[in-house]
Image (cartoon, rainbow, N blue to C red):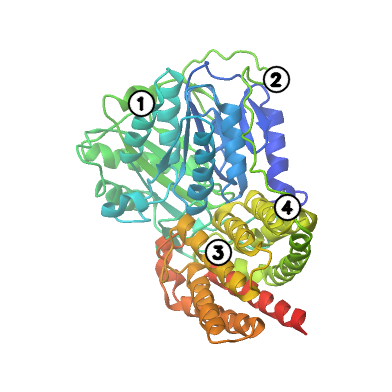
Amino acid sequence: MTRIANDPADFVPQALAGFASAHGDLVRAVDGGVVRAVPAARGSVALVVGGGSGHYPAFAGVVGAGMAAGAVCGNIFTSPSAGQAYRVAKAAHRGGGVLFSFGNYAGDVLHFGEAEARLRDEGIDARTVLCTDDIASAPLDEIDRRRGIAGDFVVFKIAGAAAERGDSIDEVERLARLANHRTRTLGVAFGGCTFPGAGEPLFTVPDGMMSIGLGIHGEPGIRDVPRTDSATLAATLVGALLADVPEQRGDRVAVIVNGLGTVKYEELFVLYGDVAALLEAAGVTVVQPEVGELVTSLDMAGASVTLFWLDDELEPLWAAPAYTPAYRKGSVEVAAATDAGDEVFEAGEAEQLPEASEWSKTAATLALGYLDAARATLHEHEAELGRIDAIAGDGDHGVGMRTGIDAAGEAADPDAGLRAMLAAAGDAWSERAGGTSGALWGSILVAVGRALDREGADPCTAVADAARAALDAVTSRGGARVGDKTMVDALDPFVRTLDERLAAGDALPDALDAAARAATDAAAATSALRPALGRARPLAEKSLGHPDAGATSLALIATAISETTRKEAR
């Protein structure tokens, strides 16, 4: 459990403020995370890492000389927003371009991708290297679908060292990709982790068992096996890792034995000794190993082993010095901290919308009522949505949806007009909630606002167009299709049924009611599906028999909209 906290909702900003205060000689806080207190050389590449909080030292703890120029810090286990990633990157940029690097999770891909696009629009060369080291999350022939766990540290170390010595962004990106390609990780959990303020862990491991193939967001492993001694555990992990290697692996490897939060250093040293002996017996030379907590998962009882297969290019970068709050290697001359970097970058101008008409303001007031209805239902079902999500995910869907709708409601100003109000609400949802759902629901509100704000349009036509625009926004940004066990499985039948009922001549309240019931039935039917995307995909078997949380929350909102429309029509 997390024992020291004030309001759990403020845990991350308070922890980040304390971290920045404790390490003010090395980092300074910016809106969205931290950057180096002493900027890197002018013209160098800025490596910006990040993701959800709860993984310290990742991500803020590796900001410093020889590693990252900045870290973007989302809520616990939740991807930061595009705005956060953009602002940290702007603060870290030194003129040589920005390289984002983070674990391969849907929410991070969406938000960092949007930030990358914004930077490129402003003329900043921005690129991304995903970390995909977890061999439990996808087979070798689907290596690009693997998630990033402790191997994130390897990519950060190599890219940071290359940027520090002044390599171009082309070269830093190439070396980071090479490092990721040559990195493999497998982990084990003995017990789950607990959110600040929560009364129980996200998952439990049966007594006497251990869970092989854990994730770092509170996801359980892919299979439970009897708990055993260190030597047998090492043989299980190393055996699987040696069966999954890059081509032309060589015979020199950097090893990371990583603690997830509760398994402590003495235990990790025991495990490392057994791992090293197995590698020596296999004819592999271990080079500059790391044993300790590098990528954690709050208080999870677990550990992972990473093998980073070295070559002549990568080994010097692995050995290069670094000096950060949480990781130090070799000798680095650290200059005195300054208040800020010596370059200032202005944000791009927001889209300028025309003055809202009275019709648009009135329509916005009506739309605010629908947001309020969605807010009420999401608050009511927060715990249930979290419970569903925790079965094969990290359990944050309920709190994420509640946080997002609250932010949307706070940002919604009917006097701005319908399109501008929903755009602001969508941006706020994405910014505050983060995660995949935050990005997608932010896009939905923006798309719906554009489709609905048409004075004189037939209401039925406008609503149907808005529903299709919402579906297009979700599928284009998230890439999901029907059958992937996502919110699309509920949204697609909602849109199709709405179109069918309106075409058949139903009144709008009746059509929305039929569409909401179709979405609800479809959400329930996702129990029979295996997830094809997102964090739940590696845990497909655990997900069977349980509905998708994203589809469920969409159906709840659709029902709230239908019921509100029915009341308005009376």
Query: Residue beneath label 4, please?
Result: 9
Q: Nearer the viewer, mark 4 or mark 1?
A: 1
Q: Residues within 10 Å of mark 4 (few under 14, many from 20)?
A: some
Pinpoint residue 203: horizontal percent, then vertical percent.
54, 63
The residue lying at 37 percent from left, 51 percent from top is 146
Residue 427 locus on image (x, y percent): 65, 51
Does residue 340 appear left or right of residue 332 in this picture?
right
Element type where label 4 sits in the image: helix
The residue drawn where x is 30% and y is 54% is 142
Q: Earlier in the sequence, mark 1 or mark 2?
A: 1
> Is residue 342 among what the camera can see?
yes
- The residue that label 2 is drawn on is 339
| Discs 1, 2 touching: Cβ within 8 Å | no
Q: CA distance from mark 3 to mark 1?
A: 39 Å
Q: Is residue 398 above or below residue 247?
A: below
Label 3 sits on residue: 470
First in sequence, mark 4 or 1: give its number. 4
Question: Of marks 3 and 2, which one's residue comes earlier in the chain?
Answer: 2
* Residue type at the position of mark 2: Asp
